């Protein structure tokens, strides 16, 4: 499916650009995007991945991932029945989902790439996306969001009266999207056009083959009472930090409270709690897993470095896929295809109650994150940060995903060329998220 979509992007862009006189802009945009894909996305991503893949390695070697997977086994085996319940891919997917829910994009992507690598080790058809991969991609493109941090930040910069007002609307919209994405993935995998081809024997010497994961039992040191007490003290310290951020009035009478971010002032208890969690999440994860692994007898520095080594290989594998997809998207954007689609669809959507101002951003969202952000900022400037349409746009921005980018990065990391129904499921989830965003915002703010 991706072959036809990519070819259609290229041909439509060239044809439209030729007749609109935008071929020079398309050439400049294509080469500029190729440079951006490598220098601004792939290479910086390697550094971020090195951190989180090292942390993930510690979580695996300490047995923590297996503990999480066992705890949520009933849910995960229903979502991914072809993945063994005790396989580390289950834990990696769970940690990716948790990072996405908290809005930790810098952690979610490396953890997701790790999960995709582990799923590829179970894939009997190299180069063809498995059902588990497609379902996992659908969940990623329609992840439930507790805190749409980027959208809230843009509204706050524009001096919105209540920039966090979109938290409930984004949560409800992403909940609808996540359910629809999973249901679509499960239904589409049964259609004849998306069925997997016969399994081929894996070639150990294949250049895109990934190193087999050792499923041997991990030997760790038992948690003695002193070690458990040390871990409890560590968690208690972070709990106290949470109270400092979310509820300083509870402790201000008996100790000095450190200053907290200005954007937490005057917010409800729920919003302050969510923001406090988002602020503490990354420092907690970066320190919890090394401590936990050390208490379980893992050589933390050696294992962290061993996990971080994977980052460069993954980063290099995604470069060609990333360049191919982003260049095609740049050609579409520079050719003016999005503008033409807006003019064609506006007469249909206006009678349905869909504001035409949202259409360019909605069409851009599956293609380009930076392009969508630019359109969102333009909406804020033109309509104001507190208008109903702006809140709809903020909810859409916080509840949808750059689907084609996610496909390129995740599937590119394991050299998947036949994406089967992953794109269809992701776009269905995006569509549901947009419809839900408009409807919910009308109910909450209209």
Image: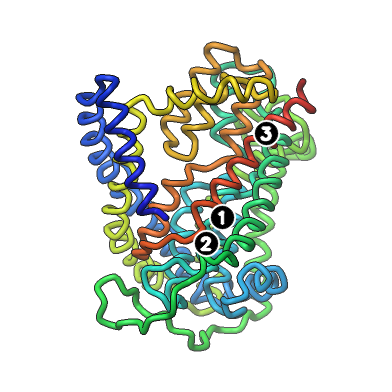
Q: Nearer the viewer, residue 68 or 432?
A: 432
Labelled pair 3, 1 in contact (Cβ < 8 Å): no
Mark 1 sits on what residue?
138
Q: Position of residue 163 (x, y in %)?
A: 65, 25
Q: Is residue 184 left or right of residue 111?
A: right
Q: Residue at x 54, y 18 (%)?
A: 379
Q: Secondary structure at mark 2?
A: helix
Mark 2 sits on what residue?
134
Q: Is residue 280 visible?
A: no
Q: Rate crowding at label 3 as few (under 14), some (14 to 19) or many (20 or more) other CA atoms within 10 Å.
A: many
Q: Secondary structure at mark 3?
A: helix
C-alpha separation, residue under disc 2 versus residue under disc 3: 24 Å
Q: Position of residue 137 (x, y in %)?
A: 52, 57
C-alpha separation, residue under disc 2 versus residue under disc 1: 6 Å
Q: Rate crowding at label 2 as few (under 14), some (14 to 19) or many (20 or more) other CA atoms within 10 Å.
A: many
Q: Which of the colour schemes (rainbow, by chain, secondary structure, one colour) is used? A: rainbow
Q: Residue at x 62, y 35 (%)?
A: 434
Labelled pair 2, 1 in contact (Cβ < 8 Å): yes
Q: Nearer the viewer, residue 229 or 147?
A: 147
Q: Nearer the viewer, residue 191 or 260?
A: 191
Measured along the vertical axis of the image, is residue 401 above or below residue 138? Answer: above
Q: Is residue 164 left or right of residue 65?
A: right
Image quadrant occupied by the C terminus: top right
C-alpha separation, residue under disc 3 versus residue under disc 1: 18 Å
Q: Residue at x 64, y 40 (%)?
A: 433
Measured along the vertical axis of the image, is residue 237 above or below residue 333? Answer: below
Mark 3 sits on what residue?
437
- Res 155 → quadrant: top right
Q: Secondary structure at mark 1?
A: helix
- Res 12 → quadrant: top left
């Amino acid at each position: 499916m991706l072959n036809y979509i990519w070819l259609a992007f290229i041909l439509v862009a060239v044809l439209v650009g030729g007749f609109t006189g935008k071929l020079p802009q398309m050439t400049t945009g294509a080469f500029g995007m190729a440079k951006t894909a490598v220098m601004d996305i792939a290479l910086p991503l390697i550094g971020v991945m090195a951190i989180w893949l090292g942390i993930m390695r510690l979580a695996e070697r300490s047995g923590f991932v297996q503990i999480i997977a066992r705890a949520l086994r009933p849910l995960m085996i229903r979502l991914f029945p072809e993945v063994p319940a005790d396989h580390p891919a289950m834990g990696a997917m769970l940690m990716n989902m948790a990072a996405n829910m908290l809005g930790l994009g810098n952690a979610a992507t490396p953890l997701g790439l790790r999960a995709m690598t582990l799923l590829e080790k179970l894939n009997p058809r190299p180069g063809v996306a498995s059902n588990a991969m497609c379902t996992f991609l659908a969940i990623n493109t329609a992840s439930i969001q507790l805190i749409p941090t980027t959208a809230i930040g843009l509204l706050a910069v524009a001096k919105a009266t209540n920039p966090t007002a979109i938290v409930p609307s984004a949560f409800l919209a992403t909940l609808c999207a996540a359910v629809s994405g999973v249901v679509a993935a499960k239904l589409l995998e049964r259609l004849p056009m998306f069925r997997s081809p016969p399994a081929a024997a894996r070639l150990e010497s294949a250049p895109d083959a990934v190193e087999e994961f050792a499923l041997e039992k991990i030997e760790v040191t038992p948690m003695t009472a002193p070690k458990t007490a040390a871990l409890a003290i560590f968690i208690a310290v972070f709990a106290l930090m949470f109270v400092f951020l979310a509820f300083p009035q509870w402790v201000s009478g008996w100790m000095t409270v450190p200053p907290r971010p200005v954007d937490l002032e005057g917010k409800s208890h729920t919003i302050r709690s969510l923001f406090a969690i988002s602020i503490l999440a990354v420092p907690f994860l970066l320190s919890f897993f090394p401590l936990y692994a050390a208490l379980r007898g893992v050589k933390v520095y050696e294992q962290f470095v061993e996990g971080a080594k994977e980052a460069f290989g993954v980063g290099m594998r995604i470069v060609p896929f990333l360049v191919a997809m982003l260049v095609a998207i740049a050609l579409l954007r520079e050719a003016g295809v999005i503008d033409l689609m807006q003019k064609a669809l506006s007469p249909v959507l206006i009678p349905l109650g869909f504001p035409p101002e949202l259409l360019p951003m909605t069409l851009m969202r599956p293609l380009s994150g930076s392009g969508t952000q630019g359109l969102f900022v333009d909406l804020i400037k033109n309509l104001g940060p507190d208008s109903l349409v702006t809140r709809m746009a903020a909810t859409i921005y916080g509840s949808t995903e750059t689907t084609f980018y996610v496909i390129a990065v995740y599937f590119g990391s394991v050299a998947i060329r036949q994406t089967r129904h992953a794109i269809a499921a992701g776009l269905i989830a995006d569509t549901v998220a947009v419809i839900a965003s408009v409807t919910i915002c009308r109910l909450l703010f209209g």
